[in-house]
Image (cartoon, rainbow, N blue to C red):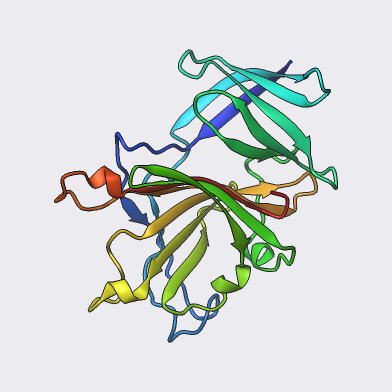
Amino acid sequence: MITIKGDTWAWSQTAPAARVGTGTVPGGKCSGTSTTVRPCDIMTANGFLTPATEVRAGSCTMHADASGRQYVNIAWDQTAWRTEEWRVETAPDGTYARLTFKYGRTFTHGYGSNAGLTVRRPMEAVLGHDAPLTMTYHRGTKGSIAYVGRTWNMGQYLKDQSLQNSIQQVTSKDSRDTHWHCCSCLAKDSQCYKGNSHVYPLLQIIDDKARWRGWVGVEASFHPYDGQADPRRHDMLSVFRVTEWA
């Protein structure tokens, strides 16, 4: 039995979060040119710039099912969280593990290694990563949920056009990054788009050798306008991973 600690950032349609600025404005040196990158504050979901809002403790034990497949049982001390289980698979190079939902009420997938949450790689290392990446996610919008898988092209963050994509480090003290996506055409007469842009809080996947291997994250883009009969129907929500081993 191993004692563990969990730090979680979470968002819910019962308490829609506004978009907040990270205090960082992209420039041509990092992406595109000074004429194609709009000097707009990179946005993220409110609550992600501060320490985790949910902190809990518990213990975990490793098991194997009848077929020999490993899984981990996590028993949290808090009554509200109770127990969850994850199937465990080891990466081909043996430096990190993939956790697949077995049962529980809150999470869907994740990755783990011996690196703690305070370990991260700088954005230069992320941009320099040359292995192909795959993005898989469950997306909920307008009352339906869809599974999507596609290639994640790091090159799109080096050349901005009409679609503005920015990835920003949140802090140097842990693995938080954030992704902001909007279309400059929607800004109309303004320089920066203020509407229903996409905000994606991210956590870096770091392996046993402190190498960056991708992200796990969520989209927490709540519809910003209340002048509709059902604004929550227009929320853009998802859970996803961007990895070379998906």
Left or right: 41 as drawn, with respect to 148:
left
Residue 43 position within the rendered picture, expressed as x and y whole percent measured from the top left: 39, 59
58 shown above or below 200: above
**Does the rendering let one see residue 186?**
yes
Residue drawn at point x = 50 percent, y = 81 percent? 28
Left or right: 140 as drawn, with respect to 224:
right
The number of numbered badges drawn on the structure is 0
- Quarter of the image with the N terminus is top right
Residue 55 position within the rendered picture, expressed as x and y whole percent measured from the top left: 50, 28
Q: Quadrant of residue 60?
A: top right
**Does the rendering let one see residue 217?**
no
Residue drawn at point x = 61 percent, y = 67 percent? 153
Residue 9 position within the rendered picture, expressed as x and y whole percent measured from the top left: 47, 38
Residue drawn at point x = 84 percent, y = 46 percent? 92
Instruction: Report the front residue among 167 and 121.
Output: 167
Residue 231 position within the rendered picture, expressed as x and y whole percent measured from the top left: 23, 46
246 shown above or below 2: below
Pick out the residue farthest to the bottom: 35
Instruction: Report the front residue among 161 and 192.
Output: 161
Residue drawn at point x = 50 percent, y = 84 percent? 33
Left or right: 205 as drawn, with respect to 238:
right
Q: Quadrant of residue 181?
A: bottom left
